[in-house]
Every structure is written in C-alpha cells, then in structure tokens.
C-alpha cells in the first residue's frame, strides 16, 4: 500500500503480515499535520511490536500507536525536537501503564516502539526496545538506533566478567529486552540529539523484528535499491524463507524525492 504526500516531496509505503503466529501483535501508523507556527508539514511514523508470549501484546502496541497519534496531533513539538520526542515517549509509556492497570490488573506486558518525526527534511527518531529504523543512502543501509537488549550489556561487561564470544552468543537471554513500553519507569530511550538532514533519494525504513530477524542487512540493502515495490519485496523475501517460527512482520518506508 502506497500513498503520496500532498506536496509530493515524500512517498509512504506500508506492509504487514501475521507470519506464522496466531495473532498480529504489530501495529503501525503514519500521521501528518501542518505546524501552526512555521506552516511546514510534519510527519510522524510509528511501528510498535507487542511482546510475544505476554498478555495483551496486540492491545498494548495499539495503545502505543494511538497514544503517539494523539500526542503528535495535539502537541507542538519544541524547538529542541529531541526533548519533544523523549517527552512523547514518556507520555505514551504512562498511557500504556494506565491501560495495563485497568485492563490486566498490572499483568506483565509491553511493546517496542520506534518513531520517526520529519519536519522540513529534518529527521528526529526515538526508540524503545528492539524495533529498528534504517536510513538508506548512496546504496548503503545504516541502522540509526541502538537496540535495548541484554546482548549489549553482555558485551559491555565481557572484560570484567571474562566472557568469551561463545559465552555471549550461547546466553539464552541475549535477545531479552532491557527496555520497552510498559516496563515501568523508562531508563533507556534511544534518540538523536542533532537532527539528520534528509536528501533527495533517501529512504527511511521502520521495521519490526519479523523483518530484520529473518533477512540479512545485505538482503535488505539489495531490496532497498529497487525503484518500486520495496516493502512488498521485503515481505515476499521474508515469507520465501519459510521459517516455521516466522514472527509478525511490519515495514514502513518513507522515500524522499
């Protein structure tokens, strides 16, 4: 599914598939508005991946996306956009915690979140968890955010704890999330302090782990070189792997012309 922005400067493509799971726990949204002060068009793209195996994963990711939309549509982001993005995440997390208290009695659940805010071809991103945002430029794919997984902690303490590479990679908890929406107080939020200037030909990809957990970065890079049909090609390439445990997959692509 593809849509053109009103001014013709960006195009947005989105795709989603349930994979081999019984329930779709990914949610996403792309929202637009005009800045009341500058008159510039603003865009917010969000991907949220409900935590598999926990209660209400799909509902929590839905809360994340709806709360992001409400915050974006009703808040003028500050001149210091990075502060505005982190405030948005903290506000959404409060909405998630409120939902969990009211709907599950505080039962453990949560969702990842990755969001891209663009205004005047300046990009600010924010992420919590292990969903990813990539920038494709000059035929190269660059991951912009850092994931909040136990693997990072293992690498940080490997010299102190005398961990070998084999020790780290054999750790069963290496991909466990260390931060997610609904965890309680958010101590880990990844974001860029300085805006990233976007150029003609740039492509932004927001992905749940059902995509990058199946395809290599080399495979995704080759797909991003296509002129059309990128998100559909990502989906088809994932499904062609025929993984028996294939996770839900979501991809949102923003192209700049």
Image (cartoon, rainbow, N blue to C red):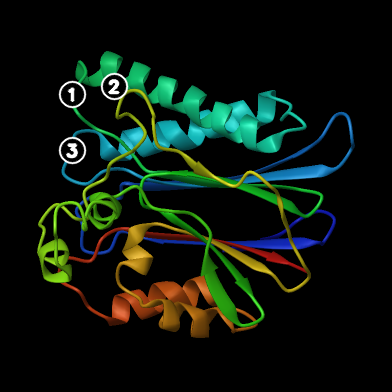
Residue position for label 1: 107
At 60% across and 47% down in the image, what residue appears?
A: 192
- Asked if labels 1 and 3 touch by Cβ distance under 8 angstroms, the answer is yes
Who is closer to the viewer here, 111 or 3? 111
- Asked if labels 1 and 2 touch by Cβ distance under 8 angstroms, the answer is yes
Left or right: residue 176 versus residue 188 is left
Instruction: Report which quarter residue 213 is drawn in.
Output: bottom left
Residue position for label 3: 54
Dot 2, how many residues are within 10 Å of its Cα: few (below 14), some (14-19), or many (20+)?
Answer: many
Say what secondary structure mark 1 lies in: loop
Who is closer to the viewer here, 193 or 8? 193
At 18% across and 24% down in the image, what residue appears?
A: 107
Instruction: Report which quarter residue 98 is drawn in.
Output: top left
Left or right: residue 44 versus residue 188 is right
Query: Which image quarter is the N terminus in?
Result: bottom right
Residue 160 in sight in this render: yes
For residue 100, the mark is: 2
């Amino acid at each position: 599914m593809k849509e053109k922005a009103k001014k013709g400067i960006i195009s947005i493509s989105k795709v989603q598939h349930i994979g081999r799971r019984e329930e779709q726990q990914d949610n996403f949204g792309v929202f637009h508005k005009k800045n009341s002060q500058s008159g510039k068009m603003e865009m917010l793209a969000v991907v949220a991946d409900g935590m598999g195996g926990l209660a209400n994963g799909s509902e929590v990711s839905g809360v994340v996306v709806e709360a992001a939309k409400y915050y974006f549509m009703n808040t003028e982001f500050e001149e210091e956009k990075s502060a505005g993005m982190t405030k948005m995440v903290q506000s959404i997390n409060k909405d998630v915690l409120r939902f969990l208290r009211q709907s599950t009695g505080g039962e453990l659940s949560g969702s990842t979140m990755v969001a891209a805010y663009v205004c005047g071809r300046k990009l600010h991103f924010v992420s919590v968890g292990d969903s990813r945002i990539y920038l494709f430029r000059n035929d190269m794919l660059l991951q912009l955010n850092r994931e909040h997984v136990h693997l990072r902690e293992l690498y940080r303490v490997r010299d102190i704890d005398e961990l070998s590479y084999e020790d780290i990679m054999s750790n069963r908890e290496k991909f466990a999330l260390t931060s997610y929406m609904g965890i309680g107080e958010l101590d880990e939020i990844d974001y860029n302090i300085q805006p990233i200037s976007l150029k003609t030909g740039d492509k932004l990809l927001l992905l749940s782990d059902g995509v990058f957990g199946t395809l290599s970065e080399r495979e995704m890079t080759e797909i991003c070189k296509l002129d059309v049909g990128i998100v559909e090609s990502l989906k088809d390439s994932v499904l062609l792997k025929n993984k028996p445990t294939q996770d839900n997959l979501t991809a949102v692509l923003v192209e700049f012309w």
